Image: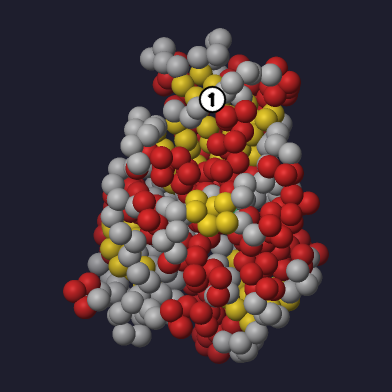
Amino acid sequence: MVIKMVDYYNGRILLQPNEVPKEWVNILPSLPSPMTPLINPMDGRPAPPEMAFAIFPKECVMQEVSQDPTIPIPNELREIFANTYRPTPLHRALRLEKDLGMQGDRIKIFFKNESCSPTGSHKPNTAITQAFYARKEGLDELVTETGAGQWGSALAYGCNLFGLKCTVYMVRASYFQKPGRKILMRSFNAEVYPSPSNLTESGMNFLKQDQEHPGSLGIAISEALEHSMRSDKIKYSLGSVVNFVLLHQTIIGQEVKIQLAKIGIEKPDILIGCMGGGSNFAGLMIPFAKDKIEGQNQNMKIIGVEPRACPSVSKGEYRWDFGDSSMKGPIIKMHTLGHTFVPSPIHAGGLRYHGMAPIISILSNNRIIETKMHHQTEVINAGLQFAKAEGILPAPESAHAINETIDQALKAKENNEKKVILFNLSGHGFFDLLAYEKYMNGELREYELPTEQIQKALQSKEMPKIDESQF
Ligand SMILES: *Cc1c(COP(=O)(O)O)cnc(C)c1O
Protein backbone atom coordinates (compact mmCIF):
# COMPACT_ATOMS: atom_id res chain seq x y z
CA MET A 1 0.00 0.00 0.00
CA VAL A 2 1.39 3.39 -1.04
CA ILE A 3 1.08 6.03 1.63
CA LYS A 4 0.07 9.32 0.07
CA MET A 5 1.17 12.37 2.05
CA VAL A 6 -2.09 14.06 1.16
CA ASP A 7 -3.97 11.63 3.41
CA TYR A 8 -2.10 13.06 6.36
CA TYR A 9 -2.90 16.74 5.76
CA ASN A 10 -4.14 18.12 9.08
CA GLY A 11 -3.97 14.57 10.35
CA ARG A 12 -7.38 13.84 8.81
CA ILE A 13 -8.26 10.69 6.91
CA LEU A 14 -11.45 11.38 4.97
CA LEU A 15 -13.68 9.06 2.97
CA GLN A 16 -16.00 9.89 0.07
CA PRO A 17 -19.79 9.77 0.58
CA ASN A 18 -19.94 6.66 -1.62
CA GLU A 19 -17.61 4.90 0.82
CA VAL A 20 -20.30 4.64 3.52
CA PRO A 21 -20.01 0.95 4.55
CA LYS A 22 -22.38 -1.50 2.89
CA GLU A 23 -22.93 -3.68 5.94
CA TRP A 24 -23.16 -3.74 9.71
CA VAL A 25 -21.19 -6.40 11.59
CA ASN A 26 -23.24 -8.77 13.74
CA ILE A 27 -21.16 -10.28 16.54
CA LEU A 28 -23.89 -12.65 17.78
CA PRO A 29 -22.84 -15.72 15.71
CA SER A 30 -19.16 -15.20 16.72
CA LEU A 31 -19.65 -14.76 20.49
CA PRO A 32 -17.48 -17.15 22.54
CA SER A 33 -20.51 -17.93 24.75
CA PRO A 34 -24.12 -17.71 23.54
CA MET A 35 -26.27 -14.59 23.75
CA THR A 36 -28.77 -14.63 26.61
CA PRO A 37 -32.49 -13.95 25.95
CA LEU A 38 -34.51 -10.98 27.22
CA ILE A 39 -36.84 -12.15 29.99
CA ASN A 40 -40.49 -11.19 30.39
CA PRO A 41 -40.82 -9.72 33.92
CA MET A 42 -44.38 -11.12 34.18
CA ASP A 43 -43.43 -14.82 34.10
CA GLY A 44 -39.61 -15.01 34.28
CA ARG A 45 -39.35 -16.74 30.91
CA PRO A 46 -37.82 -15.60 27.61
CA ALA A 47 -40.00 -12.88 26.09
CA PRO A 48 -41.89 -14.18 23.04
CA PRO A 49 -41.16 -12.31 19.76
CA GLU A 50 -44.76 -10.98 19.62
CA MET A 51 -44.02 -9.03 22.80
CA ALA A 52 -40.96 -7.39 21.26
CA PHE A 53 -42.81 -6.75 17.97
CA ALA A 54 -45.46 -4.80 19.88
CA ILE A 55 -42.83 -2.52 21.40
CA PHE A 56 -40.05 -1.95 18.81
CA PRO A 57 -39.99 -1.46 15.03
CA LYS A 58 -40.22 -4.95 13.43
CA GLU A 59 -36.92 -4.84 11.53
CA CYS A 60 -35.08 -3.97 14.77
CA VAL A 61 -36.56 -7.03 16.53
CA MET A 62 -35.38 -9.26 13.67
CA GLN A 63 -31.88 -7.78 13.94
CA GLU A 64 -31.88 -8.24 17.73
CA VAL A 65 -31.78 -12.04 17.31
CA SER A 66 -30.27 -12.39 13.83
CA GLN A 67 -27.47 -14.95 13.42
CA ASP A 68 -26.28 -13.53 10.08
CA PRO A 69 -22.61 -12.50 10.40
CA THR A 70 -23.23 -9.26 8.51
CA ILE A 71 -26.44 -7.36 7.81
CA PRO A 72 -26.69 -5.14 4.71
CA ILE A 73 -27.27 -1.43 5.31
CA PRO A 74 -30.18 -0.57 2.97
CA ASN A 75 -29.04 1.60 0.05
CA GLU A 76 -31.67 4.23 0.83
CA LEU A 77 -30.26 4.54 4.33
CA ARG A 78 -26.65 4.66 3.07
CA GLU A 79 -27.70 7.54 0.85
CA ILE A 80 -29.20 9.41 3.79
CA PHE A 81 -25.99 8.93 5.79
CA ALA A 82 -23.94 10.10 2.79
CA ASN A 83 -26.15 13.18 2.36
CA THR A 84 -25.95 14.14 6.02
CA TYR A 85 -22.71 13.43 7.91
CA ARG A 86 -21.13 10.07 7.08
CA PRO A 87 -18.45 8.88 6.69
CA THR A 88 -17.01 10.78 9.67
CA PRO A 89 -13.30 11.70 9.69
CA LEU A 90 -10.56 9.70 11.35
CA HIS A 91 -7.99 12.10 12.78
CA ARG A 92 -4.40 11.57 13.76
CA ALA A 93 -4.01 13.55 17.01
CA LEU A 94 -0.66 15.00 15.96
CA ARG A 95 -0.74 17.93 18.36
CA LEU A 96 -1.75 15.77 21.29
CA GLU A 97 1.13 13.41 20.45
CA LYS A 98 3.50 16.37 20.45
CA ASP A 99 2.03 17.63 23.70
CA LEU A 100 2.71 14.23 25.29
CA GLY A 101 6.32 14.35 24.10
CA MET A 102 5.97 11.54 21.57
CA GLN A 103 8.95 11.43 19.24
CA GLY A 104 9.22 10.06 15.75
CA ASP A 105 6.43 7.84 14.59
CA ARG A 106 6.68 5.13 17.22
CA ILE A 107 3.44 6.03 18.95
CA LYS A 108 0.50 7.13 16.84
CA ILE A 109 -2.77 8.34 18.35
CA PHE A 110 -5.90 8.35 16.21
CA PHE A 111 -9.50 9.29 17.01
CA LYS A 112 -12.71 8.63 15.14
CA ASN A 113 -14.74 11.83 15.17
CA GLU A 114 -18.39 11.06 15.91
CA SER A 115 -18.78 14.56 17.38
CA CYS A 116 -19.47 16.02 13.94
CA SER A 117 -22.90 14.42 13.55
CA PRO A 118 -25.84 16.88 13.48
CA THR A 119 -26.59 16.45 17.20
CA GLY A 120 -22.96 16.10 18.24
CA SER A 121 -22.61 12.40 19.09
CA HIS A 122 -22.68 8.85 17.69
CA LYS A 123 -26.36 8.46 18.66
CA PRO A 124 -27.89 9.50 15.29
CA ASN A 125 -26.30 6.33 13.77
CA THR A 126 -29.06 4.29 15.39
CA ALA A 127 -31.68 7.06 15.72
CA ILE A 128 -31.80 7.61 11.94
CA THR A 129 -31.83 3.85 11.35
CA GLN A 130 -34.72 3.24 13.76
CA ALA A 131 -36.71 6.14 12.28
CA PHE A 132 -36.02 4.77 8.78
CA TYR A 133 -37.43 1.34 9.70
CA ALA A 134 -40.37 2.92 11.56
CA ARG A 135 -41.31 4.95 8.47
CA LYS A 136 -41.00 1.88 6.23
CA GLU A 137 -43.32 -0.02 8.57
CA GLY A 138 -45.91 2.76 8.29
CA LEU A 139 -45.68 3.97 11.89
CA ASP A 140 -46.67 7.54 12.86
CA GLU A 141 -44.58 8.14 15.92
CA LEU A 142 -41.58 7.06 18.01
CA VAL A 143 -41.46 7.71 21.73
CA THR A 144 -38.49 7.55 24.09
CA GLU A 145 -37.01 8.75 27.37
CA THR A 146 -33.93 10.88 27.81
CA GLY A 147 -31.76 11.87 30.77
CA ALA A 148 -29.53 14.79 29.90
CA GLY A 149 -30.88 14.87 26.32
CA GLN A 150 -28.24 13.41 23.99
CA TRP A 151 -30.44 10.48 22.99
CA GLY A 152 -33.62 12.57 22.84
CA SER A 153 -32.03 15.07 20.47
CA ALA A 154 -30.68 12.32 18.21
CA LEU A 155 -34.09 10.65 17.94
CA ALA A 156 -35.84 14.00 17.41
CA TYR A 157 -33.45 14.69 14.53
CA GLY A 158 -33.91 11.19 13.07
CA CYS A 159 -37.72 11.32 13.22
CA ASN A 160 -37.79 14.77 11.68
CA LEU A 161 -35.82 13.47 8.66
CA PHE A 162 -38.68 11.08 7.92
CA GLY A 163 -41.64 13.22 8.98
CA LEU A 164 -42.37 11.02 12.00
CA LYS A 165 -43.72 12.44 15.23
CA CYS A 166 -41.27 12.18 18.13
CA THR A 167 -42.23 12.32 21.80
CA VAL A 168 -39.59 12.52 24.50
CA TYR A 169 -40.05 12.08 28.24
CA MET A 170 -37.15 13.96 29.79
CA VAL A 171 -36.08 13.50 33.42
CA ARG A 172 -37.67 16.50 35.15
CA ALA A 173 -34.52 17.70 36.95
CA SER A 174 -32.61 17.87 33.63
CA TYR A 175 -35.58 19.42 31.82
CA PHE A 176 -35.33 22.47 34.05
CA GLN A 177 -31.58 22.50 34.83
CA LYS A 178 -30.31 21.80 31.30
CA PRO A 179 -32.66 23.58 28.90
CA GLY A 180 -30.19 23.49 25.96
CA ARG A 181 -30.91 19.95 24.81
CA LYS A 182 -34.67 20.44 25.26
CA ILE A 183 -34.54 23.44 22.93
CA LEU A 184 -32.54 21.40 20.40
CA MET A 185 -35.16 18.61 20.50
CA ARG A 186 -37.96 21.10 19.98
CA SER A 187 -36.04 22.65 17.07
CA PHE A 188 -36.47 19.26 15.36
CA ASN A 189 -40.24 19.32 16.10
CA ALA A 190 -40.16 16.85 19.01
CA GLU A 191 -42.67 17.13 21.85
CA VAL A 192 -40.72 17.13 25.09
CA TYR A 193 -42.34 16.55 28.49
CA PRO A 194 -40.75 16.73 31.92
CA SER A 195 -41.05 13.30 33.56
CA PRO A 196 -42.91 12.45 35.76
CA SER A 197 -45.72 14.04 33.73
CA ASN A 198 -49.48 13.96 34.07
CA LEU A 199 -49.80 12.40 30.60
CA THR A 200 -49.39 8.82 31.79
CA GLU A 201 -50.67 6.79 34.72
CA SER A 202 -47.16 5.97 35.97
CA GLY A 203 -46.24 9.64 35.79
CA MET A 204 -49.35 10.73 37.67
CA ASN A 205 -48.62 8.21 40.46
CA PHE A 206 -45.22 9.78 41.08
CA LEU A 207 -46.60 13.33 40.84
CA LYS A 208 -49.22 12.44 43.46
CA GLN A 209 -46.38 11.59 45.88
CA ASP A 210 -44.49 14.77 45.06
CA GLN A 211 -45.62 17.61 42.80
CA GLU A 212 -41.96 18.59 42.30
CA HIS A 213 -40.64 15.05 41.80
CA PRO A 214 -37.14 15.32 40.16
CA GLY A 215 -37.78 12.20 38.08
CA SER A 216 -35.40 9.42 37.03
CA LEU A 217 -34.52 7.54 33.88
CA GLY A 218 -36.50 4.55 35.20
CA ILE A 219 -39.68 6.63 35.58
CA ALA A 220 -39.19 8.20 32.14
CA ILE A 221 -38.84 4.71 30.59
CA SER A 222 -42.12 3.64 32.21
CA GLU A 223 -43.86 6.73 30.83
CA ALA A 224 -42.45 6.23 27.31
CA LEU A 225 -43.45 2.53 27.32
CA GLU A 226 -46.97 3.39 28.52
CA HIS A 227 -47.25 6.11 25.87
CA SER A 228 -46.21 3.62 23.14
CA MET A 229 -49.15 1.34 24.08
CA ARG A 230 -51.68 4.01 23.06
CA SER A 231 -51.74 2.97 19.43
CA ASP A 232 -50.15 0.35 17.21
CA LYS A 233 -48.84 3.24 15.10
CA ILE A 234 -46.62 4.36 17.98
CA LYS A 235 -43.52 2.43 18.96
CA TYR A 236 -40.77 2.76 21.52
CA SER A 237 -37.16 3.54 20.76
CA LEU A 238 -33.98 2.74 22.72
CA GLY A 239 -30.60 4.44 22.39
CA SER A 240 -28.18 1.86 23.83
CA VAL A 241 -27.70 -1.57 25.50
CA VAL A 242 -29.76 -3.83 23.18
CA ASN A 243 -28.13 -5.85 20.37
CA PHE A 244 -29.72 -3.99 17.45
CA VAL A 245 -28.47 -0.61 18.68
CA LEU A 246 -24.91 -1.95 19.01
CA LEU A 247 -25.26 -3.42 15.52
CA HIS A 248 -26.23 -0.04 14.02
CA GLN A 249 -23.19 1.55 15.65
CA THR A 250 -20.76 -0.87 13.94
CA ILE A 251 -20.80 1.54 10.99
CA ILE A 252 -18.16 3.39 13.07
CA GLY A 253 -15.66 0.51 13.22
CA GLN A 254 -16.37 -0.46 9.62
CA GLU A 255 -15.34 3.02 8.48
CA VAL A 256 -12.24 2.95 10.70
CA LYS A 257 -11.10 -0.27 9.00
CA ILE A 258 -11.34 1.37 5.56
CA GLN A 259 -9.62 4.52 6.80
CA LEU A 260 -6.69 2.68 8.40
CA ALA A 261 -6.24 0.58 5.26
CA LYS A 262 -5.93 3.80 3.21
CA ILE A 263 -2.88 4.86 5.19
CA GLY A 264 -1.36 1.40 5.27
CA ILE A 265 -2.10 0.51 8.87
CA GLU A 266 -3.30 -3.06 9.15
CA LYS A 267 -4.69 -2.81 12.65
CA PRO A 268 -4.49 -0.67 15.78
CA ASP A 269 -2.68 -2.14 18.81
CA ILE A 270 -5.05 -0.55 21.32
CA LEU A 271 -8.72 0.39 20.81
CA ILE A 272 -10.43 2.56 23.44
CA GLY A 273 -13.99 3.78 24.05
CA CYS A 274 -16.10 5.02 26.96
CA MET A 275 -18.98 2.85 28.19
CA GLY A 276 -22.43 3.94 29.36
CA GLY A 277 -24.73 1.28 27.95
CA GLY A 278 -21.90 0.21 25.66
CA SER A 279 -23.06 1.29 22.19
CA ASN A 280 -20.32 3.68 20.98
CA PHE A 281 -17.54 1.44 22.31
CA ALA A 282 -19.19 -1.62 20.71
CA GLY A 283 -19.65 0.27 17.45
CA LEU A 284 -15.94 0.99 17.25
CA MET A 285 -14.60 -2.35 18.41
CA ILE A 286 -17.02 -5.09 17.23
CA PRO A 287 -15.56 -5.37 13.70
CA PHE A 288 -12.09 -5.76 15.30
CA ALA A 289 -13.25 -7.97 18.21
CA LYS A 290 -14.77 -10.37 15.70
CA ASP A 291 -11.33 -10.79 14.05
CA LYS A 292 -9.79 -11.27 17.49
CA ILE A 293 -12.28 -14.04 18.34
CA GLU A 294 -11.53 -15.70 15.01
CA GLY A 295 -7.83 -15.81 15.85
CA GLN A 296 -6.47 -12.68 14.18
CA ASN A 297 -5.30 -9.64 16.15
CA GLN A 298 -4.83 -11.83 19.25
CA ASN A 299 -2.62 -9.21 20.89
CA MET A 300 -4.95 -6.29 20.26
CA LYS A 301 -6.00 -4.62 23.51
CA ILE A 302 -9.64 -3.47 23.51
CA ILE A 303 -10.40 -1.21 26.48
CA GLY A 304 -13.78 0.06 27.68
CA VAL A 305 -13.63 2.96 30.14
CA GLU A 306 -16.09 3.57 32.98
CA PRO A 307 -16.47 6.34 35.57
CA ARG A 308 -15.34 5.37 39.08
CA ALA A 309 -18.77 6.59 40.18
CA CYS A 310 -20.61 4.02 38.00
CA PRO A 311 -18.34 1.02 37.25
CA SER A 312 -20.94 -1.50 36.01
CA VAL A 313 -18.48 -3.99 34.47
CA SER A 314 -15.38 -3.26 36.57
CA LYS A 315 -17.18 -3.63 39.91
CA GLY A 316 -20.71 -4.89 39.23
CA GLU A 317 -21.87 -8.52 39.08
CA TYR A 318 -22.82 -10.53 36.01
CA ARG A 319 -26.41 -11.59 36.71
CA TRP A 320 -30.06 -11.13 35.79
CA ASP A 321 -31.43 -7.67 36.47
CA PHE A 322 -34.07 -5.23 35.30
CA GLY A 323 -33.02 -2.92 32.49
CA ASP A 324 -35.00 -0.07 34.08
CA SER A 325 -35.44 1.08 37.65
CA SER A 326 -39.23 0.77 37.68
CA MET A 327 -39.15 -2.98 36.87
CA LYS A 328 -41.49 -2.71 33.88
CA GLY A 329 -39.08 -3.52 31.05
CA PRO A 330 -37.36 -6.84 30.27
CA ILE A 331 -34.92 -8.62 32.61
CA ILE A 332 -31.43 -8.84 31.11
CA LYS A 333 -28.32 -10.90 31.91
CA MET A 334 -25.56 -8.32 32.20
CA HIS A 335 -22.98 -6.69 34.42
CA THR A 336 -25.00 -4.57 36.81
CA LEU A 337 -24.74 -2.42 39.91
CA GLY A 338 -28.39 -3.28 40.65
CA HIS A 339 -31.39 -1.43 39.23
CA THR A 340 -31.95 0.29 42.59
CA PHE A 341 -28.49 1.92 42.24
CA VAL A 342 -28.71 5.70 42.51
CA PRO A 343 -25.84 7.26 40.54
CA SER A 344 -23.79 10.16 41.90
CA PRO A 345 -24.36 13.41 40.04
CA ILE A 346 -21.26 13.13 37.81
CA HIS A 347 -21.20 15.24 34.67
CA ALA A 348 -20.86 12.36 32.22
CA GLY A 349 -24.65 11.87 32.25
CA GLY A 350 -24.44 9.30 29.45
CA LEU A 351 -22.33 6.96 31.59
CA ARG A 352 -24.66 6.79 34.59
CA TYR A 353 -26.51 3.62 33.65
CA HIS A 354 -26.62 0.77 36.23
CA GLY A 355 -26.16 -2.03 33.68
CA MET A 356 -24.21 -2.84 30.52
CA ALA A 357 -25.04 -4.22 27.09
CA PRO A 358 -25.19 -8.06 27.22
CA ILE A 359 -22.78 -8.24 24.25
CA ILE A 360 -20.17 -6.20 26.16
CA SER A 361 -20.76 -8.30 29.29
CA ILE A 362 -20.11 -11.55 27.38
CA LEU A 363 -16.99 -10.15 25.66
CA SER A 364 -15.68 -9.03 29.03
CA ASN A 365 -16.36 -12.45 30.65
CA ASN A 366 -14.36 -14.04 27.84
CA ARG A 367 -11.52 -11.53 28.13
CA ILE A 368 -11.88 -10.29 24.58
CA ILE A 369 -12.15 -6.81 26.07
CA GLU A 370 -10.89 -5.30 29.33
CA THR A 371 -12.12 -2.35 31.37
CA LYS A 372 -10.56 0.62 33.15
CA MET A 373 -12.00 3.26 35.51
CA HIS A 374 -11.30 6.96 35.96
CA HIS A 375 -12.33 9.79 38.30
CA GLN A 376 -14.25 12.69 36.79
CA THR A 377 -11.59 15.24 37.81
CA GLU A 378 -8.78 13.48 35.88
CA VAL A 379 -11.26 12.90 33.05
CA ILE A 380 -12.15 16.58 32.65
CA ASN A 381 -8.47 17.47 32.95
CA ALA A 382 -7.70 15.08 30.07
CA GLY A 383 -10.63 16.57 28.12
CA LEU A 384 -9.12 20.04 28.45
CA GLN A 385 -5.66 18.83 27.42
CA PHE A 386 -7.26 17.30 24.31
CA ALA A 387 -9.24 20.49 23.57
CA LYS A 388 -6.13 22.66 23.79
CA ALA A 389 -4.22 20.35 21.48
CA GLU A 390 -6.88 19.34 18.95
CA GLY A 391 -9.42 22.17 19.13
CA ILE A 392 -12.44 20.03 19.98
CA LEU A 393 -13.95 20.25 23.47
CA PRO A 394 -14.99 16.64 24.11
CA ALA A 395 -18.15 15.41 25.83
CA PRO A 396 -17.30 14.43 29.43
CA GLU A 397 -18.26 10.87 28.42
CA SER A 398 -15.71 10.83 25.59
CA ALA A 399 -13.09 12.40 27.85
CA HIS A 400 -13.01 9.06 29.73
CA ALA A 401 -11.62 7.46 26.57
CA ILE A 402 -9.15 10.33 26.14
CA ASN A 403 -7.94 9.93 29.73
CA GLU A 404 -7.18 6.24 29.11
CA THR A 405 -5.59 6.97 25.71
CA ILE A 406 -3.16 9.43 27.31
CA ASP A 407 -2.29 6.88 30.02
CA GLN A 408 -1.68 4.15 27.43
CA ALA A 409 0.42 6.44 25.24
CA LEU A 410 2.61 7.54 28.15
CA LYS A 411 3.06 3.92 29.26
CA ALA A 412 4.09 2.87 25.76
CA LYS A 413 6.56 5.76 25.60
CA GLU A 414 8.07 4.81 28.94
CA ASN A 415 8.52 1.20 27.75
CA ASN A 416 9.89 2.41 24.42
CA GLU A 417 7.16 0.49 22.54
CA LYS A 418 5.75 1.00 19.07
CA LYS A 419 1.96 1.43 19.24
CA VAL A 420 -1.05 2.55 17.24
CA ILE A 421 -3.68 3.74 19.72
CA LEU A 422 -7.18 4.60 18.49
CA PHE A 423 -10.14 5.92 20.48
CA ASN A 424 -13.70 6.91 19.69
CA LEU A 425 -14.56 10.57 20.22
CA SER A 426 -18.23 9.80 20.90
CA GLY A 427 -19.32 13.44 21.13
CA HIS A 428 -18.50 17.10 21.71
CA GLY A 429 -19.02 18.92 24.99
CA PHE A 430 -20.76 22.12 23.91
CA PHE A 431 -23.82 21.30 26.01
CA ASP A 432 -21.64 20.33 28.98
CA LEU A 433 -19.73 23.54 29.54
CA LEU A 434 -20.75 23.64 33.20
CA ALA A 435 -18.58 20.58 33.93
CA TYR A 436 -15.56 22.40 32.50
CA GLU A 437 -16.39 25.61 34.34
CA LYS A 438 -16.64 23.74 37.64
CA TYR A 439 -13.27 22.10 37.01
CA MET A 440 -11.70 25.48 36.23
CA ASN A 441 -13.14 26.91 39.44
CA GLY A 442 -11.85 23.96 41.46
CA GLU A 443 -15.40 22.90 42.33
CA LEU A 444 -15.47 19.50 40.63
CA ARG A 445 -15.67 16.59 43.10
CA GLU A 446 -14.45 13.02 42.90
CA TYR A 447 -16.98 10.27 43.48
CA GLU A 448 -15.97 6.67 43.98
CA LEU A 449 -18.82 4.20 44.38
CA PRO A 450 -18.20 2.39 47.72
CA THR A 451 -18.19 -1.44 47.56
CA GLU A 452 -20.67 -1.61 50.47
CA GLN A 453 -23.15 0.43 48.44
CA ILE A 454 -22.80 -1.94 45.47
CA GLN A 455 -23.29 -4.96 47.74
CA LYS A 456 -26.38 -3.37 49.25
CA ALA A 457 -27.98 -2.67 45.88
CA LEU A 458 -27.18 -6.21 44.65
CA GLN A 459 -28.66 -7.79 47.78
CA SER A 460 -31.90 -5.84 47.41
CA LYS A 461 -35.04 -7.96 47.58
CA GLU A 462 -36.02 -6.32 44.31
CA MET A 463 -33.30 -8.17 42.36
CA PRO A 464 -35.08 -10.68 40.09
CA LYS A 465 -34.55 -14.44 40.56
CA ILE A 466 -34.48 -16.23 37.24
CA ASP A 467 -34.38 -20.01 36.88
CA GLU A 468 -32.39 -20.65 33.71
CA SER A 469 -33.27 -24.37 33.75
CA GLN A 470 -36.83 -23.29 32.89
CA PHE A 471 -35.92 -22.18 29.38
C1 LIG B 1 -24.91 8.61 25.35
C2 LIG B 1 -23.48 8.88 25.19
C3 LIG B 1 -22.49 7.94 25.62
C4 LIG B 1 -22.81 6.67 26.34
O1 LIG B 1 -23.61 5.76 25.69
P1 LIG B 1 -23.05 4.42 25.02
O2 LIG B 1 -24.28 3.68 24.66
O3 LIG B 1 -22.22 3.71 26.05
O4 LIG B 1 -22.24 4.83 23.87
C5 LIG B 1 -21.16 8.25 25.38
N1 LIG B 1 -20.81 9.41 24.80
C6 LIG B 1 -21.71 10.31 24.39
C7 LIG B 1 -21.23 11.57 23.76
C8 LIG B 1 -23.08 10.07 24.57
O5 LIG B 1 -23.97 10.98 24.17
**Where is 389 relative to 196, above or below?**
above
Q: How many marks?
A: 1
Judge by depth and name the residue closer to the eye, 466 or 450.
466
- x 45%, y 54%: residue: 69
Q: Quadrant of the C terminus?
A: bottom left
Instruction: Determine crowd level at label 1: few under 14, some 14-19, many 20+ residues with C-alpha closer than 10 A.
Output: some
Q: Is residue 185 left or right of residue 455?
A: right
Q: Is mark 1 within 8 Å of ligand 1?
A: no
At label 1, which amino acid type do we have? Ile
Q: Is residue 369 left or right of residue 78?
A: left
The answer to which quarter of the image holds residue 225 is: bottom right
The answer to which quarter of the image holds residue 304 is: top left
Identify the residue position indicated by label 1 in the image: 265
- x 57%, y 87%: residue: 229
Q: Quadrant of the N terminus?
A: top right
The answer to which quarter of the image holds residue 16 is: top right
- x 28%, y 55%: residue: 33
Q: Can residue 393 be seen at all in this image of the molecule?
A: no
**Where is 35 relative to 404, above or below?**
below
Q: Position of residue 189 (x, y in %)?
A: 79, 70
Q: Position of residue 135 (x, y in %)?
A: 69, 73
- x 55%, y 46%: residue: 397
Q: Is residue 317 left or right of residue 284?
A: left
Q: Looking at this view, name the residue that lies furthest to the top.
A: 104
**Where is 90 relative to 395, above or below?**
above
Q: Is residue 20 left or right of residue 218?
A: right
Helix, strand or loop status at disc 1: loop
Q: Position of residue 413 (x, y in %)?
A: 45, 16
Q: Can residue 320 be seen at all in this image of the molecule?
A: yes
Q: Position of residue 267 (x, y in %)?
A: 48, 29
